[in-house]
Image: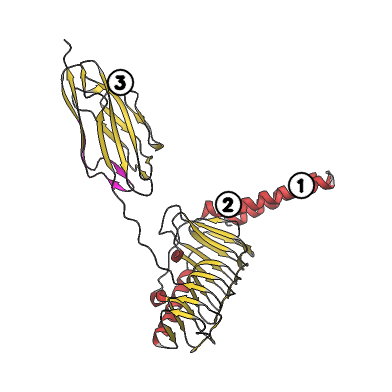
C-alpha cells in the first residue's frame, strides 16, 4: 500500500469518527466542522509527496532533444501566430498545417529521416519513463493545484490535472528530476501554472501520458510532454520544454513553445580558512582568544561533512574557562577542555551562502615562547570541497617580570 493510500484511509477514518459527533451538533456547527475536517485532510494529502518521493532518472531523449514539437499522424496543426523555438517535425504523416501564420525558429522536418528517427527515440524515452518505479501513487483522478512536490516519480492510476499553481521544489539541486506518469490523460485549467522553485530546471520534468494531454487556455507549463496519442495546446498556452506525440497529432493555437536546455551543475568554489589571536602578545599565564574563520564564496551554503579537530601547538593549552563557541549555524558540538589541546568542531555545521562564520576558544601558556597555530590545506571538509590555503596565527608569550 502506498503512502497516498494510507493518508486517504486515515482521512476517511477521521471523517467516520466525526459523523456521530456531528449528528449531535446544530446545523451551522456541522458545516463548520465539515469544512475544517476536509481542509485538514486535503492539506495532509498535499504534503504526503514531500515526505515520500525518491530519486527519478531522466530518460535518454536521443534525437528528440532538438525538437520543440513532434507529431505523428495525421499532422501537426496550428492556427494563429504560434512561435516555436526549436525544431518542428511530423512522422509518419507529412502534413504540417498553419505555418505560416505560425513561425518556427528552427527547422521543419516533414516525414523525413530526421523526424522518423526522432519518433523512434521518442518511443524509447516513453518506455524508459514507463519503466521507472513509482515513489508516490494517486489512485484516482488527481488535481495537482496547490501542491509543492519534491523530485521523484509520481504515478496516477487514471488522470492528472492542474487547475491552479503547481510548484516543483528542487531544494537547491539543479539536477533534480520529476517524472509524472498518467494511465490516461493530462489536462490543465485556464491560466494554470507549473512553476520551478529552488533551482529546478524545466528540462528535468517529464510527463509520460497514457493517452492525450491538453493544456488549457493561457496555461504556463514546463517540461517534456511524451504522450502516447495526441497533445493539444489551447489558445495562449505556453510551454518551456517539448511536446512529443507518439501516435497522434499536435494541435496548436497561438502558442509560445521553446525547447528547453539543461544548465550545467554550478561549479563549487572551495572554502578558505583564516586564523588569528585577539591579542598577539600576552604574558605567561594570560589568555588570548584564538579565532578560526571559515569563508564560503558559493551561492549555496557549505556544510561540514566531517568532524574537525584542531590541535594547539606544544606549550599552548586551553584556558581554565575555554569558552569554545561558534557562529556557524547547524548542528555539531564545539568542544575544548581546560588544559587540553584538541579543539573539536562537529560535522553538520553550516557556513552561509556567500558568507563566513567563526570558531573561538580561549588559550593560555605557562611558559614564554612563540606559538604558531597552523590550519593546513585540506583540513576544512565541506560539500563544496576542502580549503586549498594554509592559515597561520602566531601568539607571543612573554615571561612575567
> What residue did someone put label 1 on?
32
Disc on the earlier residue, 3 or 1: 1
As helix, strand or loop, the secondary structure at mark 3 comes to loop
**Left of 107 or right of it: where is 153?**
right
- Residue at position x 46%, y 55% in the image: 170
Q: State the CA–CA distance, disc 2 to disc 3.
A: 48 Å
Quarter of the figure with residue 319: top left
- Residue at position x 40%, y 37% in the image: 329
The answer to whether one can see residue 175 in this image is: yes
Q: Is residue 321 magenta?
A: no
Which percent across, then down, holds residue 349? Answer: 37, 38
Q: State the CA–CA distance, disc 3 to disc 1.
A: 62 Å
**Left of 148 or right of it: where is 108?**
left
Which percent across, then down, holds residue 224? Answer: 48, 70
The 10 Å Cα crowd at callout 2, few under 14, some 14 to 19, many 20 or more, is some
As helix, strand or loop, the secondary structure at mark 2 comes to helix
The quarter of the picture where the N terminus appears is bottom right
Which residues are drawn in magenta?
A: 373-389
- Residue at position x 32%, y 46% in the image: 297
Disc on the earlier residue, 1 or 2: 1
Using the image, tell me which numbered label, if any, was put on residue 174.
none
Disc 1 or disc 2, which is closer to the eye? 1
**Left of 113 or right of it: where is 90?**
right
Which percent across, then down, holds residue 123? Answer: 46, 77
In the image, residue 7 above or below residue 393: below
> What residue did someone put label 2 on?
47
Q: Is residue 381 magenta?
A: yes
- Residue at position x 55%, y 76% in the image: 254
Quarter of the figure with residue 321: top left
Which percent across, then down, holds residue 115? Answer: 43, 84
> What residue did someone put label 3 on?
338
The foreground one among 109 and 253 is: 253
Amino acid at each position: 500500500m502506498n503512502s497516498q493510500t494510507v493518508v486517504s484511509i486515515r482521512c476517511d477514518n477521521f471523517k467516520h469518527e466525526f459523523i456521530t459527533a456531528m449528528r449531535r451538533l446544530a446545523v451551522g456547527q456541522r458545516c463548520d466542522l465539515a469544512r475544517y475536517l476536509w481542509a485538514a485532510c486535503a492539506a495532509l494529502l498535499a504534503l504526503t509527496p514531500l515526505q515520500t518521493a525518491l530519486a527519478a532518472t531522466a530518460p535518454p531523449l536521443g534525437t528528440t532533444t532538438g525538437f520543440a514539437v513532434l507529431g505523428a499522424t495525421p499532422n501537426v496543426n496550428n492556427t494563429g501566430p504560434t512561435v516555436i523555438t526549436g525544431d518542428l517535425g511530423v512522422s509518419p504523416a507529412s502534413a504540417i498545417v498553419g505555418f505560416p501564420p505560425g513561425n518556427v525558429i528552427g527547422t521543419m522536418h516533414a516525414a523525413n529521416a530526421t523526424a522518423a528517427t526522432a519518433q523512434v527515440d521518442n518511443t524509447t524515452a516513453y518506455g524508459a519513463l514507463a519503466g521507472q518505479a513509482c515513489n508516490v501513487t494517486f489512485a484516482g483522478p488527481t488535481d495537482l493545484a496547490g501542491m509543492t512536490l519534491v523530485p521523484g516519480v509520481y504515478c496516477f492510476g487514471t488522470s492528472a490535472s492542474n487547475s491552479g499553481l503547481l510548484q516543483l521544489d528542487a531544494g537547491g539541486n539543479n539536477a533534480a528530476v520529476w517524472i509524472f506518469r498518467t494511465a490516461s490523460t493530462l489536462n490543465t485549467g485556464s491560466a494554470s501554472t507549473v512553476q520551478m522553485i529552488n533551482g529546478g530546471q524545466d528540462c528535468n520534468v517529464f510527463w509520460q501520458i497514457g493517452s492525450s494531454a491538453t493544456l488549457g487556455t493561457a496555461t504556463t507549463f514546463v517540461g517534456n510532454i511524451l504522450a502516447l496519442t495526441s497533445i493539444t495546446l489551447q489558445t495562449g498556452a505556453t510551454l518551456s520544454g517539448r511536446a512529443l506525440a507518439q501516435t497522434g497529432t499536435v494541435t496548436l493555437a497561438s502558442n509560445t513553445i521553446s525547447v528547453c536546455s539543461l544548465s550545467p551543475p554550478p561549479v563549487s568554489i572551495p572554502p578558505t580558512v583564516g586564523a588569528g589571536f585577539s591579542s598577539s602578545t600576552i604574558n605567561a599565564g594570560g589568555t588570548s582568544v584564538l579565532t578560526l574563520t571559515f569563508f564560503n564564496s558559493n551561492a549555496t551554503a557549505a556544510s561540514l561533512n566531517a568532524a574537525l579537530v584542531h590541535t594547539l601547538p606544544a606549550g599552548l593549552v586551553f584556558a581554565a574557562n575555554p569558552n569554545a563557541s561558534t557562529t556557524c549555524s547547524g548542528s555539531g558540538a564545539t568542544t575544548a577542555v581546560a588544559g587540553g589541546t584538541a579543539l573539536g568542531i562537529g560535522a553538520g555545521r553550516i557556513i552561509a551562502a556567500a558568507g563566513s562564520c567563526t570558531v573561538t576558544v580561549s588559550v593560555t601558556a605557562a611558559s614564554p615562547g612563540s606559538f604558531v597555530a597552523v590550519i593546513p590545506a585540506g583540513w576544512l571538509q565541506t560539500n563544496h570541497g576542502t580549503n586549498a590555503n594554509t592559515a597561520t596565527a602566531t601568539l607571543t608569550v612573554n615571561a612575567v617580570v
